[in-house]
Image (spheres, rainbow, N blue to C red):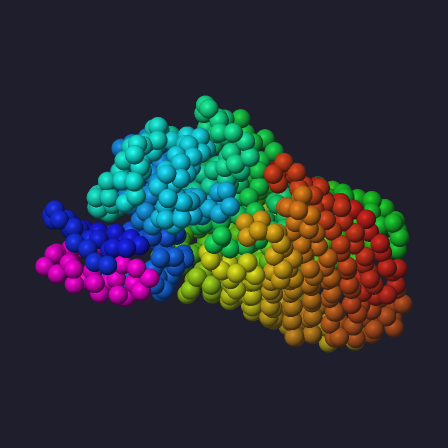
Amino acid sequence: MNVLVVDIGGTHVKILTTGQDTPRQCDSGPMLTPKKMVSQVRKLSSGWRYDVVSVGYPGPVLRGRPVSEPPNLGAGWVGFNFEAAFKRPVKLVNDAAMQALGSYKGGKMLFLGLGTGLGSTMIVDGIVEPMELGHLPYKKATFEDYIGVRGLEDHGRKKWRQYVLDVVQRLFAALEPDYVVLGGGNVKNLHELPAGCQAGDNANAFVGGFRLWKKRSKRNASGRATVCLALMLALLFRARVARAQESPLPSAPSEVATNLMALMVAAQSGDRERTNTPSGFFGVSSSASSQVPVDLRPFQLALPRAHLFDDWFGLLPKLHDRGIVPTLTFVSDVAGNVSGGESQGVTHADNLGLDLLFDLEKLADLKGASFLVSMSQRSGNSLSQEHVGNVFTIQQVYGGQTFHLIDVAYQQKLLDDRVEFRLGRIATGDDFLVSQYDYLFMQNGFDGTPVGIFFNSPGMTAYPNATWGARLKVRPTQRTYVMGGVYNGDPSIRDIDHNGTDMSMNGPVFAIGEVGYQRNGLPGDSPLLGNYKAGIWYDNSTYTDFETVGLGRSSGTRRGNWGFYSLFDQVLVPFGDPASNRGFGVFGTMMVSPNESASQMPYFFAGGIAFRGIFASRPTDSAGFGVVYGSFSSDLRHAQEREQQLDPTVGVQTYETVLECTYRFYFRKGALFFQPDIQYVIRPGGTGRIDDALVLGCQVGVNL
């Protein structure tokens, strides 16, 4: 296989193909667009035969695509289709990463490219991680401003050399590589190399480009493959650099190496947010954004969380290396109504949850495949049922108070994660009607799935209840998705006597579809992140026909019901620097199930405001205020009025509203939270016969 390697620099584009000895080049610069680059390269490579193309790109690259425009070239690089332009398979990587790969001789290597800017790449046991360290703060600007070509021109060679020495020493102390390779055209301006460094060769960029197409051998379970290397190194480096800039440089290696595993574990704590997880506003995060410079990273609704017992005494890293990711959490909701309700009292409800995620790519070499098994143990009592008498459950972890087997599900991602399907025992609420904002609250009207749909669809499922189902998700673009699911809608599977092991498929069918659009949220976007979703569902269950109730004869039934919904969340005001993820946002949900002869609650609304990091000293704490409102069916109301004529104890339900104000304190890097909570229930039960209730409580959660 012949490989064409294209090395794009700030002043020249250089190319070389397999079997050739002499590179060819053309000019680069601020007017170079990707279309011009491809045109020039095709002319330059005339007479050369090649099957595939490697491109070294002078900027951050994520999953083989540029995530920001290069500062020294023309526009149009982000979103450009390189394979269509070259009419060949293309692998695009950061240019420093490509040169680093060509310079690599094993072990742990840090590559620094002293060129127009500062390229940087870390390679650990063969794993290449572009780091974009040049964008991190240094003195009054960034590393790149001082040791890139701009720094050389502004400060002169003597000062520039001092800055290079200082920066290399800091990076060496922070990342503790076995050796540092200094590449780029400005290496020649150094009189001597800093200790522990060796000079690279620009020709190694071509070596790296050829190596990109060599087959990699499978990595064993010793830890060579780690999906969170980017986040681990970025977090590690930022912590050390912050200390290094405020104190003298250390003269000996630090404790960094011993902290690597703890950082990795914190980064890999999970990828889903549900009612059993203690990570709140706004859940847990993916590590993908760590590959993007700080100033280009999108606002993160989900933040990483640590484990209370760190790496489980060394067990977690070993499990992760083998492709097994366990998550063990405990959440307890304590609440009491100090006034109102049917009676006053205090109750608690608890959930102990265990998730086991099996990475089948590591375990069985099935690319993009995973298998999830989850279970929970619930205990305690409901304040709503025992004392208040309202329909929107005050404690979100109440329901199904027993041991449950929940998910037993296979998931497969295809076509660069653009297509994804799940199959097995799954809960609809894991995928549909999801907003990270809802997980902040203790009231079940918000958390985890907005509760209105459950009044109208007995086939809808959410944690801790799962059923047989299949879900397909397609992403036409990076900002949009279309998703559909079909499930066994038998409500009897929720009976606690089964403990989640009822494997029957008696039906009826429950089907749901959803479309979503993300505003901002990609690298380089504004921090005003927004998510907008809409969906429709159909449940083929048998429903009581409210129009036939209370007429002095047996009530009739009807088959099927449907509804539609929309929900959104939007960051309105970000606080602090772009990497702080502090801000203020709004959210809302609307559900309509228009057939009032079958729907108990045809109109449901929930919405509110949420904050993260109101106080700079507590940047991850979250606060929120929300309102839940549900209007009961007019046909149900008329049926109750008819029944009331025969039995005066029958109440007539109109609406119920709950107000909630909450604040969540995070401790131990998110492993533990404590959340005081106030709820005010208006018209409990919807009948007007029960006094409005003031509820004080708290939620406590821990990620073990």
- Point out the stretch of residues depicted in magenta: 28-53
Residue 373 visible (yes or no): no
Does the magenta portion include 168?
Answer: no
Task: Give percent across and percent down for residue 589.
Answer: 64, 65
Position of 591 relative to 292 (above/below): below
Asked whether, in this view, residue 71 is left or right of residue 302, the answer is: left
Residue 238 visible (yes or no): yes
Asked whether, in this view, residue 290 is left or right of residue 201, the answer is: right
**Which residue does the image show at 24% across and 44% down from the upper left?**
202
Closer to the camera in the image, 617 or 659 = 617
Can you tell which quarter of the image residue 533 is in? bottom right
In the rendered image, the quadrant that contains the C terminus is top right
**Which residue does the image show at 10% across and 59% down from the upper left?**
47
**Which residue does the image show at 38% across and 61% down from the upper left?**
78
Task: Give percent across and percent down for residue 651.
Answer: 84, 66
**Which residue does the image show at 55% across and 58% down from the upper left?**
527
Asked whether, in this view, residue 241 is left or right of residue 592, the answer is: left
Does the magenta portion include 40?
Answer: yes
Can you tell which quarter of the image residue 450 is in? bottom right
How many callouts does the rendering have? 0
Task: Give percent across and percent down for residue 666.
Answer: 66, 42
Task: Give percent across and percent down for residue 325.
Answer: 49, 39
Position of 501 relative to 446 (above/below): above
Closer to the camera in the image, 646 or 372 = 372
Closer to the camera in the image, 451 or 492 = 451
Can you tell which quarter of the image residue 133 is in? top left
